[in-house]
Image: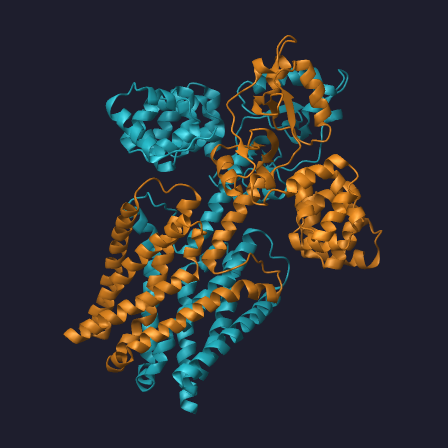
Chain colours: A orange, B cyan
Amino acid sequence: MQFELNKEYIQQVQSCLQEDLNAPLLEEINQLHPADIAEVMDQLEREEANRLFGILDNEIATQVLIELEEDIRENLMESLGAQEIADKLISNMDSDDAVDVVAELPDKKKDDVISAIEDIDQAQVIVDLLSYPEDSAGGLMAKELIKVRKDWTPIKCIREMRKQAEDIENVYTIYVVNERDKLLGTLSLKKLLLASSGDKVEDLYFEDILSVKAYEKSEEVASIMKKYDLIVLPVVDELNRLIGRITIDDIVDVIQEEAEKDYQMASGLSVNVDSADSIGMLTRARLPWLLVGLLGGILGAMVINQYEAQLGLYPEMALFIPLIAAMGGNVGVQSSAIIVQGLANNSLGFDSLSYKLGKEFLVALLNGVVCSILILLYTIFFKDSLDLAATVSIALVLVIIFAGLFGTLVPLMLDRYNIDPALATGPFITTMNDIVGLFIYFGIGHIMYGLL
Amino acid sequence: MQFELNKEYIQQVQSCLQEDLNAPLLEEINQLHPADIAEVMDQLEREEANRLFGILDNEIATQVLIELEEDIRENLMESLGAQEIADKLISNMDSDDAVDVVAELPDKKKDDVISAIEDIDQAQVIVDLLSYPEDSAGGLMAKELIKVRKDWTPIKCIREMRKQAEDIENVYTIYVVNERDKLLGTLSLKKLLLASSGDKVEDLYFEDILSVKAYEKSEEVASIMKKYDLIVLPVVDELNRLIGRITIDDIVDVIQEEAEKDYQMASGLSVNVDSADSIGMLTRARLPWLLVGLLGGILGAMVINQYEAQLGLYPEMALFIPLIAAMGGNVGVQSSAIIVQGLANNSLGFDSLSYKLGKEFLVALLNGVVCSILILLYTIFFKDSLDLAATVSIALVLVIIFAGLFGTLVPLMLDRYNIDPALATGPFITTMNDIVGLFIYFGIGHIMYGLL
């Protein structure tokens, strides 16, 4: 049944770790699901977490390690020797998890751990997998899989599969390859069990399957698995030879990370942080975009400064500075967000750029006119100034249209140059829109007050 | 192999649909993966999409229907009669997909389709499933599963499983229940095949499994499946009786939707839209938050109006209005975003509210002091005004601290009252921060200019 972590439990664990390492409570922790143990460890002080890890059974410890938050795991690995890591932890792991853990180690320790691995084949597999970029299909795949040759008989298949299955936890799919390991298709267990002894795999297997190349980006892998509702996806090399498989649980993490990245951009965070991070780390995530905002504010001050004489004559223009700046920012983020999400989901369709801009123009015009009429009425009634009313409402329509078009164009341009389009929803573009908005506002004001 | 959709292909399909419904190209479409066919249909005009759907083989059409975008599917269902929907489409579907399709129909048609379903059992299952809220475990689950009784022998299990498996595509897990259908555990296929004929299920099965209640929220289901890396999760009723199972592919959609919802809130979109939606729909998504921003701008104007006399005396104060407003907004969104993400990932830990606010105070103070020093230097050097410099830099620190604390507090409060905390990253709070920022700025200005 599901385990509910609470503060009291953490405190009990802490006092046992301080006072009595043989307490029954600590014995019980070994019975929890590894993901729950990891959650407990994430809440402990580092020293305590390391101590708790030390009393876990080896096999449990291996699974807990994979589930830990990255910084807790790194700290833990520092406290362990290379031989210990290799013998107690790596030797029990699936290749995809092992390589993730090894990849996080400092270079020197990485080499030590790899040379300390007793099973040469496992060490070789880890070295192979380390060569793929972390955010590629190769970086996500595991080497453990079940494969049969197309010229085998059912009996030979079952015999070979038993051998292969020994160190595989879940058999998702049986892959069919030729004598050169080229991926040909998949074989269903049902068909295999119902086959007569004279059959061969080549008569039984299903040919029409999807695979990805090892260097495919992980976002692309995620979008394929999502689109086709796949639980597992085979990975092939340039010669279409089967080299691994990716399971959906790793892809869930990719999807989550992608979404978080976009959300952080939109919120003005430059690094992935959570509230438990240190003050220094939080500042590192937050200060860069604040400085961009600060620079934007200074540029805004310069724009207004240009029109200081005009502002001296018509001080009521100052009233609507925040409105103009805020509306430009809001509209820009809205239109960028729609494009960014469309790019992420491959759902933008095949409309031309001019069609997209034309449509955005109409949406912005509609929104702008509604907002303008409201602000026009407010200004006429409450400020009793026709000049000001005309200036604010004309400027507002123009600002909304500009921000909408700009917000549509920028993410598309960033994407074309392979820059993350989510940047466009961050404070950079918002700030740009603020400044341009002020220009428009004072420019219109200049004309209006000149005319009247 | 994977199919790459392009504009030319769509155009070819369109001209075939207009001119020659027997064209070989349209024949070929039947060979594509249903998800690809759905992607083609999403790009066509509605009339064309309906025509293409009409020439698909029945079984393919069923799978395509599930993959379509919601609005295209609704349009398609309008064009089909209740009898046709029941016979050709619903009858071939898994219960979770069937109920999704039926749930989207208008009430009258929903009843017609259900009464047109020939298989009474299937109709009953659909009616059952319709009773669960869409965003609950019951709303996500399918009824198709393999279950065995704990008192059965291996031979009886295999015989019964063959019957049950007939209309199930993928056997993920074999569930073990007692005579009252209470979920007891799972049975591995390996153990079942290796068992001797004298064994009973109760000697072989694995007891320690996770399940969810039917009324559990889908976000909660997603977080359990994510945390424990599950491919499939059983659903039970209040008496722990097994009533269905949820597979990871449906959860991937939940995770995606959750993330998109937060992203939309942060971007000021009130409805999930994409760029292909109509201008009216896009306006409906965008205008509400713009009106909130507009109201905020008007309130901002009122604040400045309060200090009009002061602004007349010290017009240079107008220069930094955009800076103060923007920085308050930015800091508020940053600190809210960290809390919102922490709430979504259950990673906030057990620190007290005062600890959280104290930490945010320090982060904001640090960020605020850095920004303030920079703006102080800028103002002294370039504006040559000590009053202004002191006013802007003091106000900026205070605004950043206020916005940081407010941004931390609001999502926590919303969450306590079961309101979506992501609201706090939307334009509502940004606007609030703008206004309070202006108050602080002019208040400080009032004091400073009074003093000097």
The furthest residue to the top: A198
Name the residue located 37 percent from the left edge and 25 percent from the top edge.
B113
Residue A233 screen position, x and y as percent:
56, 32
Q: Does A235 appear above or below B278?
A: above
A80 above or below A348?
below
Left-right relation of A3 to A13: left
* Whether residue B194 is visible: yes
Position of the C terminus of chain B, as image quadrant, is bottom left
Decide which of A11, B371 is in the foreground and name it. B371
Q: Which residue is pictured at 39% across the width and 47% down the height?
A: B272
Q: Nearer the viewer, residue A312 or B2?
A: B2
Point out residue B449 in the picture as x, y percentages from the top left corner.
40, 88
Looking at the image, which residue sits at the far left? A452
Figure disc tally: 0
Q: Residue at x 57, y 18 (%)?
A: A205
x and y percent of residue B441 in the render?
Answer: 41, 78
- Image: A404 above or below A181: below
Task: Kindly tell me whether residue B150 is visible in this rendering.
Answer: no
Q: Is residue A235 above or below residue A405?
A: above
- Residue B299 in percent (x, y) is at 34, 70
Outermost residue, bottom direction? B452
